Amino acid sequence: MELEVYNISGQKTAKKALLDDNVFSIEPNDHAIYLEVKHHMANKRQGTHKSKEKGEITGSTRKLKRQKGTGTARFGSIKSPLFKGGGRVFGPEPREYGFKLNKKVRRLARKSALTYKAKENGIIILEDFNFETPKTKIFLELLKNLQLQDKKVLMVLTENDKNVFLSSRNIQKTKVVNAASISTYDILNANNVLIAESSIKEIEKINSNN
């Protein structure tokens, strides 16, 4: 697959980027995508929820009334879940929601997501660039030149670029990542994926079957 290469002014250059069909043009696996997105969202959950059960409630242990002869149900403690302020039955406990997902499944999910974006013409190859200083205005101009100012954008760089990251930090719907940390969720959550020309090989290397 060949794509045009754009510069930060939004103009096509004379270069073309050749994308590996084994990464950007496979038979998508929807179930792998589902598992990877579920894995990503589960790992983001804190799992710190907690409610007090009967044994954790502070209150009197006095028996409320005699056991028999009242004609009503027996009550043994004010901390019973039946009373207001009592403990909760089978309430939530702190837990880890994360689960193990095989590397091959995660790799397949990323390739499937990249394939969907490529089919939707949602991938734009950007000529390598850098910012001398971190300036939000420069990054906004870049998005405007590519007509992406109102869209969700994921920018993929070869490595962490502090100036580019700081320039994008205050812009809603925009995320900058390096090629090694690109995720299925980020790809699918973006309307367009901007890939720096030099990071193509890194993406292909990470997602290759070798």
Image (tube, helix red, strand yellow):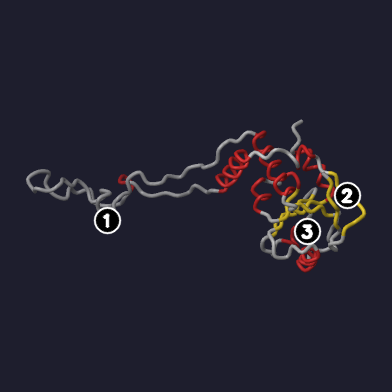
The image quarter containing residue 136 is bottom right
How packed mark 2 is, by other alpha carbons closer than 10 Å (few <14, some 14-19, many 20 or more), is some
Q: Nearer the viewer, mark 2 or mark 3?
A: 2
The image quarter containing residue 100 is top right
Distance of mark 2 from mark 1, alpha carbons?
A: 70 Å
How packed mark 1 is, by other alpha carbons closer than 10 Å (few <14, some 14-19, many 20 or more), is few
For marks 2 and 1, the one nearer the N-term is: 2
Determine the secondary structure under disc 3: helix
Single out the residue that lies furthest toward the left: 69
Of residues 140 and 19, the one drawn nearer to the viewer in this rendering: 19
Return the x and y of residue 48 as percentages of the image width and height: 48, 49
73 lies left or right of 36: left
Which image quarter holds the C terminus?
A: top right
Q: Nearer the viewer, mark 2 or mark 1?
A: 2
Q: Residue at x 74, y 32 (%)?
A: 209
Q: Residue at x 79, y 62 (%)?
A: 146
60 lies left or right of 177: left
Residue linked to disc 3:
164
Residue linked to disc 1:
84
Asked if the residues shown at circle 2 and circle 3 are in contact, with their CB atoms under 8 angstroms apart, the answer is no
The amino acid sitting under disc 2 is Lys
Asked if the residues shown at circle 2 and circle 1 are in contact, with their CB atoms under 8 angstroms apart, the answer is no
Label disc, if present, on residue 104 of the rendered structure: none
The amino acid sitting under disc 3 is Val
Distance of mark 1 from mark 3, alpha carbons?
A: 55 Å
Return the x and y of residue 8 as percentages of the image width and height: 84, 61
Determine the secondary structure under disc 2: strand
Tell me if I can see residue 187 in this picture.
yes
Of residues 164 and 184, the one drawn nearer to the viewer in this rendering: 184
For marks 2 and 3, the one nearer the N-term is: 2
109 lies left or right of 155: left
Residue linked to disc 2:
16
